[in-house]
Amino acid sequence: MTGRRGWFDSMAVVRSSPHLADLSATTLAHQGGWDEILMVAVPVAIIGLLLVVADKRSRAQAAERANEEATAAK
């Protein structure tokens, strides 16, 4: 019973501030789970894209260095 009462007390604080009430309504308005999936998938996709771009640049620089060394050795 104590844990539940604490939850109601925190909701009283949220109701007392209009800004916090808007935030809690937005936070509690779930869209069936797809919004949570996007909150994880979008940052993971961005990081993956950055890794692909960095790998491509790294391979291009390595190939350029290998060409320069081959040219210098001749």
Image (cartoon, rainbow, N blue to C red):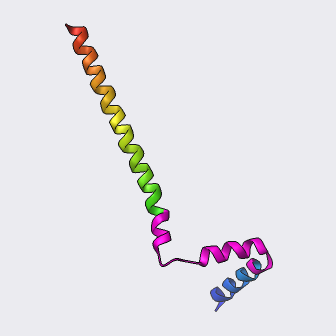
Residue at left offset 30%, top offset 32%? 59
Q: Nearer the viewer, residue 9 or 62?
A: 62
Residue at left offset 68%, top offset 84%? 6
Answer with left or right where residue 7 lies relative to residue 63: right
**x, y (%) of residue 50?**
42, 44
Residue 71: name its quadrant: top left
Residue at left offset 73%, top offset 72%? 20
Q: How many labels sit on residues? A: 0
**x, y (%) of residue 58?**
34, 32
**x, y (%) of residue 43?**
47, 55
Dominant secondary structure, magenta: helix
Residue 3: name its quadrant: bottom right
* Residue 24 in the image: above or below residue 57: below
Magenta stretch holds residue 36: yes
In magenta, the rendered stretch is 14-39
**x, y (%) of residue 42?**
46, 58
Answer with left or right where residue 35 lies relative to residue 64: right
Residue sticking out furthest to the right? 16
